Image: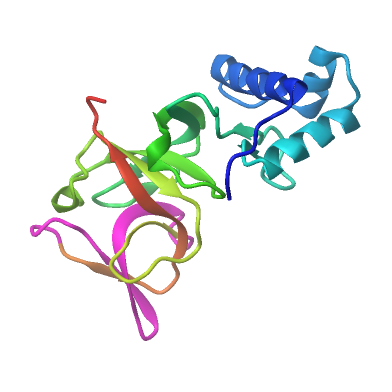
Amino acid sequence: MGTGKPSKRQAEVLHFAREYRRENGYSPALTEIAKHFGISVPTVHQHISSLREKNLLTVEKGKKRSIQALRDHKSPVVEIPLMGFIAAGGPIEAIREPEPIEVPRSMLSSGANFYALKVSGRSMIEEGISDGDIVIVREQQTVDDGEKAVAYMPDRNEVTLKKIYREKDRIKLVPANKYMKPFYETNVEIQGKVVGVLRKEF
């Protein structure tokens, strides 16, 4: 899916949403956009729908303040939410503290939602992922065997970063560190696939 060109007003809405998120750490509500431009909420909704069709932003259904300006068609970087820390060692509790972070547009494919997580631990160092790096994650609920994934374990309410392998009635979570052993879980929800890494000095 290609990127469409926004109308003048759509470009203004996109710019407002991006700047609002940069300043506040979260997205504007439709009512705030409407008030800013002196237009009705249904009109804002139409603009947002058009921008979604043109692949310039995403919105999570049923979730407030989820407008995400994905594509600035002139910019080499795109903002995605940094959702907190993820363990690449022993699992730690899931943390969700979204704040925008800029990543190279080349790391992202169109038509998908992305988020970032800061890595804590050294279990993925043989895959080039070190403590303090930031991983770029594409939201998806399945990965192929051997792919690096964000895995949520509901029984523990913990999230970890590991390579995933399916066995008969369980999931094998494999670190990329020869000094660490794989472990097994029966209840695992895949929350995304790792598609890129930003080094901590980035």
For image coordinates 60% across by 16% down, the residue present is 19
Q: Position of residue 135 (x, y in %)?
A: 34, 42
Q: Position of residue 82 (x, y in %)?
A: 45, 33
For image coordinates 70% across by 18% down, the residue present is 12
Q: Which of the 4 quarters of the picture holds residue 108? A: top left
137 inside magenta stretch: no
**Which residue is at the front of the view, 109 or 137?**
109
Colour setting: rainbow
**Which residue is at the front of the view, 104 or 29?**
104
For image coordinates 28% across by 67% down, the residue present is 146
Asked if 140 appears above or below 54 in the picture, the reply is: below
Q: Quadrant of the C terminus?
A: top left
Q: Is residue 107 left or right of residue 99?
A: left
**Which stretch is magenta?**
154-180
**Which residue is at the front of the view, 106 or 164?**
106
**Furthest-left residue in view?**
179
Q: Position of residue 167 (x, y in %)?
A: 33, 81
Asked if 92 appears above or below 178 in the picture, the reply is: above
Asked if 198 appears above or below 12 in the picture, the reply is: below
For image coordinates 29% across by 58% down, the residue present is 162
**Furthest-bottom residue in view?**
168
Q: Is residue 43 left or right of residue 101?
A: right
Q: Which of the 4 quarters of the picture holds residue 51? A: top right
Q: Position of residue 18 (x, y in %)?
A: 60, 22
Q: Which of the 4 quarters of the picture holds residue 196? A: top left
